[in-house]
Image (cartoon, rainbow, N blue to C red):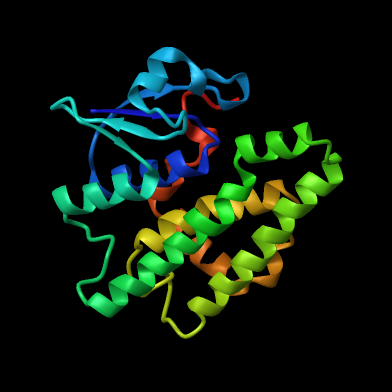
């Protein structure tokens, strides 16, 4: 299979972690987001949204959207599990992951930020809005897991929630958020990065890193 990504894409980062945790090998193709390579005709034929990541399977199927790819990995490579067996616990993990992937992360998408700039918004307004959304969202995420045992978001093993949290904390720092106000989230991040699957997925360790 082949993973299409970009070293700094937080969505592609989630999938890299999932692949590493599952021990699944994938060839890599790189598309530089800031150069617009994700809008090349050949790539748009794979992913009409022009977003990263995309996973091409050995049988020719094409998967898009990071959480859908992670759920496919969970269904086809069930160990180690990224979702609890209990239905309520699974819903909690998915809610945390979606709070990041659906509500926080999209605001920092290059397409969204570029649109705001094109509408004449000054840079401090554009980045300030993104920073406000991150702060509000991660504060809510910290509350969602405040009663959960550690060291990870939901217990003794990483889940889909952790795959989303670690890249988002990195993005928070890029936008100037004070992440020290979320000690529980930072403790989870530290526990995750102690694992090779997370450490090896970091942007600076990718072949296309700049």
| Image height of 53 relative to 210, above or below | below
Residue 108, horizontal then vertical, whole percent: 63, 45
Nearer to the camera, 17 or 38:
38
Q: Is residue 47 left or right of residue 193?
A: left
Residue at the image point whose x is 49% and y is 66% from the top = 188
Position of the N terminus, as image quadrant, is: top left
Residue at the image point whose x is 43% and y is 61% from the top = 97
| Image height of 35 relative to 139, above or below | above
Q: Is residue 131 left or right of residue 102?
A: right
| Image height of 19 relative to 152, above or below | above
* Residue 186 seen: yes
Residue at the image point whose x is 27% and y is 65% from the top = 83
Residue 174, horizontal then vertical, whole percent: 69, 46
Residue 94, horizontal then vertical, whole percent: 36, 65
Nearer to the camera, 63 or 8:
63
Nearer to the camera, 36 or 165:
36
Position of the C terminus, as image quadrant, is: top right
Q: Is residue 52 left or right of residue 21?
A: right
Residue at the image point whose x is 68% and y is 51% from the top = 173
């Amino acid at each position: 299979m082949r993973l299409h990504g970009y070293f700094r894409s937080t969505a592609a980062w989630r999938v890299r972690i999932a692949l590493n945790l599952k021990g699944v090998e994938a060839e890599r193709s790189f598309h530089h987001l800031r150069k617009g390579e994700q809008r090349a005709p050949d790539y748009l034929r794979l992913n009409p949204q022009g977003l990263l990541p995309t996973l091409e399977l050995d049988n020719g199927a094409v998967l898009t959207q990071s959480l859908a790819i992670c759920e496919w990995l969970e269904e086809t490579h069930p160990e180690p599990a990224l979702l609890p067996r209990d239905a309520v616990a699974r819903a909690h993990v998915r809610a945390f992951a979606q709070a990041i992937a659906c509500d926080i992360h999209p605001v920092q998408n290059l397409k969204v930020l570029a649109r705001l700039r094109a509408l004449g918004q000054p840079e401090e307004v554009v980045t300030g809005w993104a920073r406000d959304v991150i702060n509000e969202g991660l504060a809510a995420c910290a509350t969602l897991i405040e009663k959960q045992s550690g060291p990870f978001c939901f217990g003794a093993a990483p889940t889909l929630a952790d795959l989303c949290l670690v890249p988002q904390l990195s993005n928070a720092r890029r936008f100037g958020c004070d992440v020290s106000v979320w000690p529980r989230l930072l403790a989870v991040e530290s526990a995750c990065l102690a694992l090779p699957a997370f450490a090896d997925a970091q942007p600076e360790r990718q072949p296309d890193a700049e």
